[in-house]
Amino acid sequence: MRTMKGFESRPLHMAARLGSVAILKQLIAHDCQVDSRTEAGNIPLMIAAKPDQADCFLELIIAGADLGLLNNYRDSAMQLAKRSGFGSLVVSIIRHAILSE
């Protein structure tokens, strides 16, 4: 998808941005690349690193999103989560992801 300003985004990025866990699950089940990047280098996990997107963040970690990737600004999903005030939940989300496998 391309916006009016010329930014490209894939359905997985849109689902993460909108917080739609059901759509994320469907896209992941149909082999969408969980680490696909936007033009800014963001993966869906980085987009979901917001306080109100904990379920999406968890689902992407369970699906194998790479926590070590950096975007074009040298930020990781963990750094973005900490900056957004979401950092306190990250440990419990990762613990939940590990236990669900």
Image (spheres, rainbow, N blue to C red):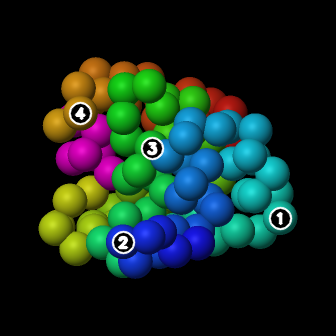
Tag 4 near tag 2, CB within 8 Å: no
Q: Distance between the residues labelled 1 and 2?
A: 29 Å
Say which amino acid is labelled 3. Answer: Ala
Q: Distance between the residues labelled 3 and 2?
A: 22 Å
Name the residue located 44 percent from the left edge and 25 percent from the top edge: 52
Tag 4 near tag 1, CB within 8 Å: no
The majority secondary structure of the magenta stretch comes to: helix
Q: Quadrant of residue 75?
A: bottom left
Q: How far apart are marks 4 and 1 (CA)?
A: 30 Å
Q: Which of marks 3 and 2 is in front?
A: 2
The answer to which of marks 3 and 1 sits earlier in the sequence is 1
Q: Distance between the residues labelled 4 and 2?
A: 25 Å
Name the residue located 49 percent from the left edge and 29 percent from the top edge: 54
Q: In which quarter of the image is residue 89?
A: top left
Q: Is mark 1 on a helix, strand or loop?
A: loop
Q: Pick whichever, 81 or 3, lies toward us.
A: 3
Which residue is identified by label 4?
84
Which quarter of the figure is the C terminus placed in?
A: top right
Q: Point out the stretch of residues depicted in magenta.
A: 77-82
| Residue 63: percent from left, percent from top | 65, 53
Residue 48 - label: 3
Q: Distance between the residues labelled 3 and 1?
A: 20 Å
Say which amino acid is labelled 4. Answer: Ser
Name the residue located 81 percent from the left edge and 51 percent from the top edge: 26
Residue 91 in view here: no
The answer to which of marks 4 and 2 sits earlier in the sequence is 2
Name the residue located 61 percent from the left edge and 49 percent from the top edge: 15
The answer to which of marks 4 and 1 sits earlier in the sequence is 1
Which residue is identified by label 2?
5
Say which amino acid is labelled 1. Answer: His
Q: In this view, does 17 lie to the left or right of 69?
A: right
Residue 30 - label: 1
